[in-house]
Image (cartoon, rainbow, N blue to C red):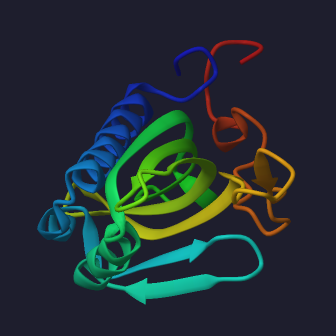
Amino acid sequence: MVDGWGDEADLLDELRIRRLQSAYVDAVNRRAWTEFVDLFLPTSVLEVRAGAERADEVVGPEAIGSLIGGYLEPLDFLVQVVLNARVVTRWRGEEDRAAARLSIAEHRQARGTGRERHSFGTYHDEYVRVDGRWWFARRRYDRQVVTAEPGAGRDLDVVPMPEDATDLGPPGAAWRGRPGPAGA
């Protein structure tokens, strides 16, 4: 056990999952949708919520790329940045499952108008290990903050974190009860 947070295998799994997350962000920023077949299982689900007014859900890497590509079509550019990520390995007691919550920022510019917009949101992820490799099994994105439309009388539109957000448990909870140093 390493500092009460799991053993070296847990740390290696977390590193591999973080590399998966980074590969996704890199593919989105480059609009490299064909790379999603190396990140998502054929049965993977992506759900996108932009407040209460819209929820889109698709299955499979090709459909996920098409959905996100459609969102980005009216933009000159989009840059997505991971601000923070909390990864839990051995999620719900299963060796080959993991979950994470990622806070992200997006910076974009609309094609034609040049209008700049910023948003912040949270990915709620589930991962599965198949043949020793981690894959996205399910992703849900909740947009929580976005630049308000001109004339709205405020700078930002804010939507609170949904009550049905993935419960990862308290820090270290996934490893409690395992052998380790005293007090860990």
Task: Locate the C terminus and report the quarter of the image it occupies.
Answer: top right
Q: Position of residue 65 (x, y in %)?
A: 27, 74
Image mark count: 0
x 44%, y 35%: residue: 10
> Relative to residue 3, is residue 73 drawn left or right?
left
**Residue 172 in which image quadrant:** top right
State which quadrant residue 58 falls in: bottom left
Residue 151 to residue 182: above or below: below
Asked which quadrant contains residue 45, the reply is bottom left
Observer-nearest of 5 and 17: 17
Q: Position of residue 154 (x, y in %)?
A: 84, 48
Q: Identify whether 95 is placed above or below 14.
A: below
Q: Please name the residue shown 78% across and 57% down the image.
A: 151
Is the residue 39 above or below the residue 79 in the image? below
- On the image, the x and y values in percent for residue 67 come to 37, 80
Residue pushed farthest left?
Answer: 34
Height in image: 171 above or below 30? Answer: above
182 sits to left or right of 159: left
- The residue depicted at 14 percent of the width and 63 percent of the height is 35
Query: Residue 104: image x %, image y %?
Result: 54, 43
Report the residue at 12% width, 69% height from top. Answer: 34
